[in-house]
Amino acid sequence: MYWRRFSLAVVSGFVGYGAWYTYNGDGTLIKEANPISSAQKAPGFATSTIYPTPIGPEETLDARKAVIIGTDGLYTDTIEGPISKDTDDSGRKVLEMLTPDQATSKLRRNEESYFIGRGKGVLRYDVVQIPSNDPIEDDHSEKIIETDDAIGAAPNSASDWMFWGVFDGHSGWTTSAKLRQVLINYVARELNSTYQASPNPSTEAIETAMKTGFTRLDNEIVHESAQKVMKGNSKLVAAELLAPALSGSCALLSFYDTNTGLLRVACTGDSRAILGRRSDSGKWAATALSTDQTGSNQDEEARMRKLHPGEDHVIRNGRVLGGLEPTRAFGDATYKWTRQVSERLKESFFGRTPSNLLKTPPYVTAEPVVTTTKIQPERGDFVVMATDGLWEMLSNEEVVGLVGQWIDKHSSDSNGNSASSWTKMFTASQKGLPVEASKENGNSGQKAPIRQRQWGVKENDRFVVEDKNVATHLVRNALGGKDKDMVCALLSLPAPYSRRYRDDLTVEVIFFGNGPKSGDIIVNKEASASANIKPKL
């Protein structure tokens, strides 16, 4: 759990000047020409170097790595230091680039890992967050609800309902924070009513309950808040109630019923869930449990055009009314309110001007698409849930293969204690990523990773296994893996520069398996940033 603070900020879209970041070191420079490349100082570059103490004639200056953020790309160079200030006529700034150790510390700052000793098919889950926006707009939540004998298919056997959620906020963090606080409760309430009505509800009934939980919460966020504000006359109350409506968030929620072994994944927006399962070949197979819901998804575009006939620009340039990329989201009220409501709220309180193309709202819905999958704990199933920042960098197969690579590494390193013996069920070791090739035909609706091309990353031999937390392992490899310069450079970039090269990242990995039943949920200290954290399930 962490606290956020309110802040006022003026944010520009693109920065008109560059910035330099340096660290001591002698590693290999990035050689790719576009966009991260070995840089030459621009003509007319003038340095203003300040030393804390005079440099004697016998003393030498350490070489320091630099990352240069220019309007045309990201570059690296080596500068003789120490440097505390460096500017040119364009206003470039020089700061020390993170060292590899500092980059690792930043990667692991928000990592958490837990062993689930419930003996009901879930062994462990790992989670990590890396901000790009300031403050981070992503969020996540987890919860176990122990049901009584009256709920569930099997008599005299209480079931665990396990929930994991990742929430990708945009235009602010308030909507994703709201989802962290209450979405699981809304869905659990609907599920409880469904199971009370029938001890063995159909798949359709359960999926409908999850959809109802999503849409009821969004109605409260968007429409009930507007009604309350318009009945009152307090700008302070309006600011509090309307903040989650004016910003927005995607939501990805997984619900695992331990009695049935069924995993339901509800997706609103473009976060993604992937199942990894060991195949007969010994490699892992990647199966998508959700589809990215954006204006570039042909099915979503067809749905939108059917709902809004005659509106040629309902999807323009892959975005709703040319503005919002996800076609389903919580909040984003200016795509859901009538023009009259938007203008009244803006005039009396505050708000955003609706699009000139807005004719027949709502254009965006929070109703999720729900999938149902039978989990096979004996096959070592795992699920990766992540906001779209990860999928911009890695494909489904790369993510599953990286988890498989991590399992192979930690299975061979297992020393048999309670904190690592869970890996014994995962066997096999091989070179390269142990994953089967994709069978997709290119029309799956999933966005392809774009960042590796943007960064000029080499395809071969780029992955490493250095982290105890598998979610952190995924993020490290998404940011460059074996290329330490790349990892350090990307983690050195502060907001808002960083947003041009990477998004906020929230990654959660759940391991299924038939483990011991102690009833305890234990913090995995070697894969968690702080030993003082408490399990939130």
Image (cartoon, rainbow, N blue to C red):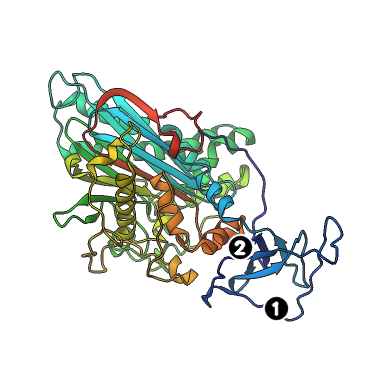
Q: How far apart in space, not on screen, are marks 1 and 2 (Cα)?
A: 24 Å
Q: Position of residue 299 (x, y in %)?
A: 27, 61
Mark 1 or mark 2, earlier in chain = 2
The residue tagged with tag 1: helix, strand or loop?
loop
Q: Position of residue 282 (x, y in %)?
A: 18, 55
Picture quadrant where residue 280 is located: bottom left
What residue is pinned by disc 2?
A: 13
Residue farthest to the bottom, as pictured:
43
Mark 1 crowdedness (10 Å alpha carbons): few <14, some 14-19, many ≥20? few
Q: Position of residue 38 (x, y in %)?
A: 59, 75
Mark 2 crowdedness (10 Å alpha carbons): few <14, some 14-19, many ≥20? few
What residue is pinned by disc 1?
A: 42
State whether residue 250 appears in this view. no
Count every numbered label the image shows and give the total: 2
The residue tagged with tag 2: helix, strand or loop?
loop
Camera-nearest label, 1 or 2: 1
